[in-house]
Amino acid sequence: MFLRRLLLLLCLLVAAHRSVADDGYRLWLKYDLISDPGLRKDYQKAAGFIVGAGNSPILKTAAEELQQGLQGLLGQTVPIHSAAKKGKGGIILVVEATANVSGGALGKDGYRIAEQGGNLVVTGSTESGVLYGAFALLRQLQTRQPLRGISLSSSPRIQYRLLNHWDNPNGTVERGYAGSSIWKWYELPERIDPRYQDYARANASIGINGVVINNVNASARYLTPEYLEKVVALASVMRPYGIRVYLSVLWAAPKVIGGLASSDPLDPKVKQWWTAKTDEIYKAIPDFGGFLVKANSEGEPGPQDYGRDHADGANMLADALGAHDGLVMWRAFVYKANSNGDRFKEAYQEFKPLDGRFKPKTLVQVKNGPIDFQAREPFHPLFGAMPRTPLVLEVQLTQEYLGFATHWVYLAPMFKETLDADTYANGPGSTVAKVVDGSVDQHAISGIAGVANIGADRNWTGHPMGQANWYAFGRLAWDYTLSSQTIAEEWARQTLTADAPAVRTIADVMVRSHGIYTRYTMPLGLHHIMGQTIHYGPEPWLASSARPDWTAVYYHKADAVGLGFDRTEKGSNALALYKPEVQRRWNDPSTCPPNYLLWFHHVPWTQPLSTGRTLWNELCTRYYTGADSVTWMQQQWATVKPQVDAELHADVAARLQTQRKEALWWRDACVLYFQSFAKQPIPAPFSPPERTLDEIKRLVTIYQLR
Ligand code: BDP
């Protein structure tokens, strides 16, 4: 009998242990019971009940999310009351459009959390503000902050905070590394996967308020009545979380599904078609967000097919929106095939002359850098150059050029590098962030977009650490003044462990990881030397492709003299696109930050750099120390093994092994290839690679095979 009981107990223990194994599904919203009984008691005293602010869908969500979170964290029932409840020790949710905080009124969708009369009052300036406040309060508990004396207020600095999904109707995801699309088009609208709600919850918890659900290389299918029904179903899941749904549209849709002969934006029939289509969408989805357009870019159709320009196209769609509350986000990611040109300048040359021509409700969406989401890019010269047009900053969370779901790269430092860059558009301090939030040019609308790294993998992002990039994007979109370190610690504490030293170790690795990645892949401002088509692994020797600006040699320009793209006056003069203050700094190789050097200069191999080493020696040093730093990452990760979930620890440890292996590919491929131009030995204390360039080329080629 005793033995049987013991056996049963053991089975239960094993089962319990299994059930808490962390598969990453719960993201940063774990809400596990707080183990410190003292702290738990304090929280229980302050959060014994909730008084809801009302019964609208968003307000109900706010109360219910708070309830669910608190019940998990505190291990007790937390009732929701509808009317102001007498008593102390509860949380009161309030909407107050004119709520003030020290320093002024709360911004739109802002919140304030303060103690009042023995309760915690969460005030939102809108219903969404209450929801964000509820999540902010949960974050306080999840990161074990005291509630006594709490006084917090925050308002979003950027108004439209969007995820852009590059998801296709057949379930694939362009540049997606976390499985297939989370949208199950063939099941919708009848079956609503419960995952959609968890997705909405995660987004709302970090302030994301819009999602473009389909690829910018868009299918016309989404605009058919059959697919709009499906979009309606998704919109109804997002709505209670304050999230609006947007669509990427195919420019040629009037031809493809409308039976028209043209999609010329100035053709009255085309205008009529879009107006009717837009009305149809708003009838079904009254809070529809609007359209995202990739036109005349990488083979996509657009207004230029009819001799019109981007502004003609965007304005026609803005007219079609009419009085509906929606936006047109028109992408500036364009580059003509011009073998004598410099791709760096092309978007600027096309869009700058259009400044002032875009109608209200139209925003131009610009990638962080001038080429294409490279590991590190200088800020796009359009920021600060289009004062009469609101610009959306587009960053990429999916790691197309940053090692897919294999390499651990925390992207907040990269996003911040762009956000904090000074354009000098309106004097010093005109950072990209302030151009984007509208404050430099007094725009009433502002937006930021992150190309999602989310897929159907159980843990959402493939690499467990990729979740931090989703999280960081939302937090920075809300408040770009937060530091990368703060966000990393906040995320790690909620997601991985409550152990403070372990959190610090993990955050330290995170914050350095982007610098490490660039060192072993594209140091000193090298760019676009990755594997053709797949954009994975090194291929600096790539000399021919369908277009010259898809090769690597177009960008690195290695020769017997040196390395790098001369974009000064003597070269393509792309530097002239920036304000004089920026030009001055980057124009002189001795003041140009080493991280941008080869973006702008063709530097002799023997040239001493500000680091004291010659270009060749510095290049080798970065490749070698970068690859070695992955070993450091592995060591750091090993030290936190006792503090994080075993399954998750093993997952990340295994991915780090691949990362180390591939960092060595990058190192060996690049030093051996560039050595064939520099004709210099690998400097001490580093040892030359043990394999030949041909051996490494073969390895990389395997990844390109069909
Ligand atoms: C590039 C991707 C391509 C996208 C394109 C875009 O390689 O798949 O369609 O960006 O942003 O980085 O439109």
Image (spheres, rainbow, N blue to C red):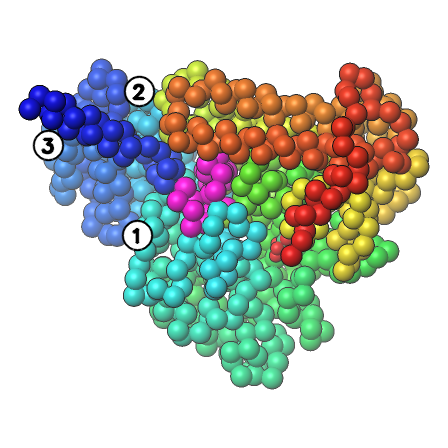
- Which of disc 1 and disc 2 is earlier in sequence? 2
Q: Is residue 220 visible?
A: yes
**Residue 233 in which image quadrant:** bottom left
Q: CA distance from mark 3 to mark 1?
A: 36 Å
Extreme residue toward the left, this view = 1
Residue carrying label 1: 194
| N-terminal label among 2 and 3 | 3
| Image-based side of 60 in relation to 671, left or right | left
> Quick check: which quadrant has ligand 1?
bottom right
> On screen, 200 above or below 92?
below
Say which of marks 2 and 1 sits in front: 1
**Part of the protein shown in magenta:** 453-474
Residue, far right = 560
Vertically, is 271 above or below 629? below
Which residue was labeled with disc 3?
86
Element under label 1? Answer: helix
On-image quarter of the N terminus? top left
- What is the three-letter code of the residue carrying label 1? Pro
Is the C-beta separation of discs 2 and 3 under 8 Å?
Answer: no
Residue positioned 58% across, 34% down in the render: 658
Asked if residue 168 lies in the magenta stretch, the reply is no
**In magenta stretch: residue 461:** yes
Q: What kind of element bears circle 3?
A: loop
Q: Measuring 57% from the left and 51% from the top, which residue is drawn there?
A: 175
Mark linked to residue 307: none
Question: Could you tell me if residue 524 is visible in this image?
Answer: no
Residue that mark 2 sits on: 146
| Amino acid on which disc 3 is placed | Lys
The response on whether ligand 1 sits within 8 Å of label 3 is: no
Image position, residue 639 (x, y; %):
48, 17
Amino acid at dot 2:
Pro
Q: Earlier in the sequence, mark 3 or mark 1?
A: 3
